[in-house]
Image (cartoon, helix red, strand yellow):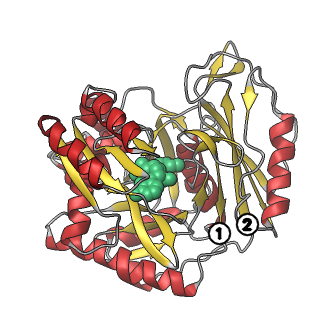
Amino acid sequence: MKKNVLILGSGGREHAIALKVSQSELLGQLFVMPGNPGTMDIAFQLPGDLSDHEMVKSNILGFDIDIVICGPEVPLSEGLMDSILNTDWAYKPILVGPCREGARLESSKAFSKEFMKRHQIPTAAYQTFSKDQENEALEFISKMSVPVVIKASGLAAGKGVVICLDHASAKKELREMFQGKFGESSETIVIEEFLSGIEFSVFILTNGNQYVLLPEAKDYKRIGVGDQGPNTGGMGAVSPVPFLDESLLKKVKDQIIHTTLNGLKKDNIPYKGFIFFGLINVNGDPFVIEYNCRLGDPETEVILPRLKNDLIELIIQMEEERLDHVEIELDSRTAVTIMLVSKGYPDQYEKGKEILLPPDIPEDSCLFYAGTKLEDQLLKTNGGRVISVTSLAATMQSALSKSLKLADEIKYEGKYYRNDIGFDLGA
Ligand code: AMP
Ligand code: GLY
């Protein structure tokens, strides 16, 4: 039977999910709330704010939605899935995304670090401090070797982590965070040891008991070429990650994925949806830097184009506890995405610049819209991250070249992008 699907969110990630779902033979009708100009051609747009749980629920009921996929973390951490599950309906839609408790893996670093410690999941040594423990926290910093990593415990749009090269700057950062640099999110702080290695990300779809491994990715968070400057939501991504060989992958599965799922079970935390493991390879051993309770942006823009399985079918298999028998099939080519952003991002930037797109997009490339809007029939910038340009090719270098060519052909005032995505992965 065909399924009506509702995707929640409005970024490049949600556009990539919508495109993948639109290719499913099992799709009835596709809805996106609120969506963006990129999802308009493939889905019905439902305006509204995801913090309005009643409106999300009335859309589910009104449009006979069978599957709800939540893209971003904030609605999950605010308990949107709990609200839907707790509604007394004659039928229950399949929900892809955890309830509030499961979302704490991402929304509270204090919680996730404690979880990892409890279940012996490899992660950096740390200690958590609340606002009223400033003196203890300062003392703890003095005893640590540098660099010191200071993290706001709550959600901070990827900006709540600061790596401090000396004790004085670590103490200054700590004070600023406790004084409200990230609002409530930095009322509790995690101070942890700095791990040296190369980062990569692994994604699963799980029902808490079984899982399938999706393609891995490496993202590039810093604004500047050569990984310089402040962190952003993500400036580009590559999949696959060449150094993720069989031996490292086995360690990831045994030491991290299995222990995490067992930990959730032991703690009685139900979990259905995606888990994004932000990992670091320290001399051949994987450590968890962070969990996310959703797919990444722009990682989704490289992992879904490589996934050959039908996404709706995978979600049904998740719901029906049939993931153990699923074979994941991948496009063997490399996918590279480049994020085009607004000048000034991740700080202040202007919006409303008209975007001109090239007339033809090659078959093995795709534009995923992020911060964009339609105004008077014109496509305009409407956010820091504007468009993600993905290409697939036999080598990373040729995929990058294709995306760079398209990135150059897209025109708007203040366009900026990194031209070195994948620079540290070899040709
Ligand atoms: P997070 O939001 O926890 O993923 O942290 C953001 C970024 O900070 C990560 O992608 C890493 O580049 C860096 N980072 C976080 N924790 C550590 C750590 N313990 N050691 C080294 N780098 C870290
Ligand atoms: N690109 C990192 C994230 O989605 O959190």
Query: CB atoms at circles 1 and 2 under 8 Å apart?
Result: yes
CB at mark 1 closer than 8 A to ligand 2?
no
Q: Which residue is mark 1?
A: 240
Dot 1 amino acid type = Pro
Q: Position of residue 289 (x, y in %)?
A: 41, 60
Q: Work out how far the residue at label 1 is from the one at label 2, CA to CA, in angstroms.
A: 6 Å
Tell me: 407 left or right of 64: right
The residue that disc 2 covers is 334
Above or below: residue 122 compared with residue 173: below
Task: Report whether 403 appears left or right of 217.
Answer: right
Q: Position of residue 46 (x, y in %)?
A: 45, 31
Under tag 1, what secondary structure?
loop
The quarter of the picture where residue 23 lies is bottom right
User: Considering only vertical position in the picture, is 347 above or below 19?
Assistant: above
Residue 157 can be seen in this image: yes
Question: Within the image, what quadrant is residue 97 found in?
Answer: bottom left
